[in-house]
Amino acid sequence: MQIVDIDFCVPEDFKPLTAIESACFDIPWEERLIKRDLNEPGGSVYLKAAVKGIIAGYGVLGRAEDASHLMNLAVLPEYRRRGIALQLMAAFGEISLEWECWRMCLEVRSSNEAARNFYSSIGFVYSSRMKGYYADGEDALILTARIPFRL
């Protein structure tokens, strides 16, 4: 496992985060939304995972009533399979507990088998399907897990 430094994102992280988005997703999050979130904190929580000062991954967590909501999780391809996503999820689990949220939900592309397997390995289970959720028309699977996760 690659040990990383987990910290809250700051506005200066904008360029590395958008580079990660472009490297990880065919349809990345809009840059203006990331910039807004970083410059106007208070809604979503952005965490970064750095390896020797390089931001290798990041994630975004929100809150929906009594559950936390993982809105995004991305790790640069060259840093995958080193436990970075797992460490980000552990941090998000801790934040969720601070919020007194005992479960987390997320959406994942139905075709993203690697992500589905990762989430399943820490306790996420299928909840429902949202037809045509993504901009390209692909369905999203809604997954939920109890917190703390099986790490």
Image: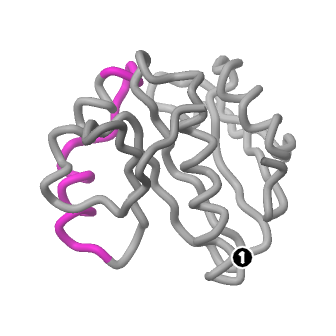
Please state the horizontal and vertical placement of residue 109, each as a whole percent of the image: 62, 28
Q: Residue at x 41, y 16 (%)?
A: 78
Please state the horizontal and vertical placement of residue 54, each as a whole percent of the image: 26, 36
Please state the horizontal and vertical placement of residue 126, each as a whole percent of the image: 85, 40
Position above or below: 121 against 90: above
Q: Residue at x 64, y 21 (%)?
A: 112
26 on left or right of 129: left
> Mark 1 — residue?
101
Q: Residue at x 33, y 39 (%)?
A: 29
Q: Residue at x 70, y 71 (%)?
A: 67
Q: How is the image coloured?
A: one colour
Position above or below: 83 against 94: above
Query: In the rendered view of the protein, which quadrant contains the N terminus?
Result: top right
Position above or below: 26 against 12: above
Q: Which residues are magenta?
A: 23-41
Q: How many marks?
A: 1
- Which amino acid, mark 1? Cys
Q: Is residue 52 magenta?
A: no
Q: Quadrant of residue 133?
A: top right
6 on left or right of 42: right
Q: Nearer the viewer, residue 118 or 52?
A: 52
60 on left or right of 89: left
Q: Report crowding for label 1: few under 14, some 14 to 19, many 20 or more residues within 10 A (C-alpha).
A: many
Circle 1 sits in a helix, a strand or a loop, which is it? loop
Q: Nearer the viewer, residue 65 or 7?
A: 7
Q: Is residue 33 magenta?
A: yes
